[in-house]
Image: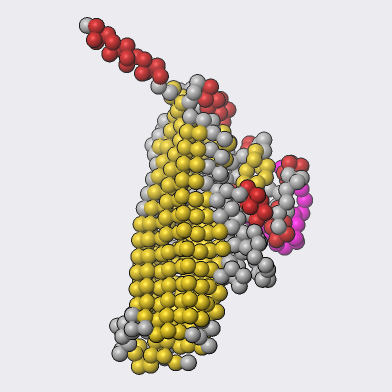
Amino acid sequence: MKKSFLCLAFLLCLTGLQAKIYNIKDLGADTTGKNTCTQLINESIQKAAAEGGGTIYFPAGNYLTAAIHLESNITLDIESGAVLRFSDKFEEYLPFVKVRWEGVFMNSLSPLIYADGVENITIKGRGVIDGQGHAWWKESRQLIDEIRANGKTSGTNKLQQMWLDANKDIKVSPYYESTLERKFFRPPFIQFHESKNIVIEGITIINSPFWTINPIGCDDIIVHGVTINNPSKNPKGHNTDGINPESCRNVRISDCFISVGDDCITIKSGRDEDGRKYGRPCENITITNCIMLAGHGGVVIGSEMSGGVKKVAISNCVFNGTDAGIRLKSSRGRGGVVEEIRVDNIVMNDIQRNAFIFDLFYDKDSKEEPVSERTPAFRNIHISNVTGNDIKKVGYITGIKEMPISEISFSNINMVAEVGFTAKTAKNIQFHNVDLAVKKGASFAFDECTDIVLNNVRSKAPLAGQPIVELNNVTNGLINNCFQITPADVFCKEVNSQIIWGNNFLDNVKTVKIN
């Protein structure tokens, strides 16, 4: 009897220690989606936070809300059958809060779900959160078109004047000033600042006004089993990236399904001087078991990477229908180093432009300048075990003379594309067991490159009269262990290049080398 009493007392004690669940429907929220429940949600969050934490629970139903601000130890649990729609009335995202917008810190409209300096926050469930982005996209597109046509907006409305008043000291590089001329910046869907221990799991996110999941300067993040669907065609949700960690550490992204109007997953760390001043790299990132459909890029690093990006592992992903597969982009003036990147076990299909991009001329044309903190660098990047079919172009490297792209390797690559791989201004580039079948031009073409290794490279569908490999102004190159299985007319064309020929087996080639 005494033992049973003690067990009951213990269970009651545990029950008393459990975090409280705030059932939004039971608290009086309208489940038809006609009347907003913003105040109820945020008051419940504040009440739960004051008690040490709790769960804000959304049972099946339709809920209308504006900005939700999370506190420490708060869970949003959005049940299967629940749809949380966010208002498209811009004024409902006042007052301004600190945001990072395309790599620049500013004061602007609140993200739809926002947190600053908190810990232990979760968004989970099998429900849907809908950003209702159409009004945001329309307003943004109108401003962009107006500035392109006239160099400025036709007037300044109330929200734009508020933005000007709140950002008097903001400074950006001259090329970005036309973007600030908008004076209106769509909010990210989910943006957390300098927070830690974050979990986003299971939910479906649609119609984001701008970037979808966008943590800034955060530590210990899990994004698992999330579906993100933002329109990529009419009506297009432009710049509606999927998952964009910026200046974050220890990020794990897995088992996600992403189809968006811009890049699917992008790793960033700030723009130009603003990003270098913040000075936090994005590091210790894993991306695995994800499927990317429509989007500009499957996994992208940059272009805002002024704080640096390092220690990234991307594996076991499918890119089907994206413009690019793996894309690294930056430009002079940005600064930052991208390094220690591993990509493995990837399948690509129907890639509209390039399977691989390494581009240091992304934002603008620029002239050579002395190496400084403004100089970006891509190095120590390794890609392996990639299969691709129906590819527009295998890819390209475009470096800058003062900082050539370096230490890039491709191993066990098999691709069918219209155009092959080109590299300009790069060093220490290696291809091992790579088979490229293209419809025009060389499968491999190098210009003004140094320290090039081609080991067991070939084409399963060589073109009549077209060299498989073209080398122009290449210094210290090695061609070794190549076995051209399918008969070919010409294997290699060299122009003003210094190439070492190792042990190759090219009996199926009519002309091994032409100068």
Which residue is painted at 31% across and 85% down in the image?
505
x then y, percent, for residue 389: 37, 70
Residue 89 can be seen in this image: no
459 drawn magenta: no
Residue 57 can be seen in this image: yes
Horizontal side of 195 relative to 345 (left or right) equals: right
In the rendered image, the residue lying farthest to the left is 1
Which residue is painted at 56% across and 44% down in the image?
217
x then y, percent, for residue 164: 75, 45
- Residue range of the region highlighted in magenta in the rendering: 141-159
155 drawn magenta: yes
Q: Give above or below for 275 relative to 324.
A: above
x then y, percent, for residue 339: 50, 59
Quadrant housing the N terminus: top left
Q: Which residue occupies the foreground of this view, 201 or 228?
A: 201
x then y, percent, for residue 324: 48, 64
Horizontal side of 317 relative to 331 (left or right) equals: left
Number of numbered discs overlaid on the protein picture: 0
Which residue is painted at 51% across and 64% down in the image?
379
Which residue is painted at 49% across and 23% down in the image?
52
Image quadrant where residue 13 sits = top left
Image quadrant where residue 304 sits = bottom right
Main SS of residues in magenta: helix
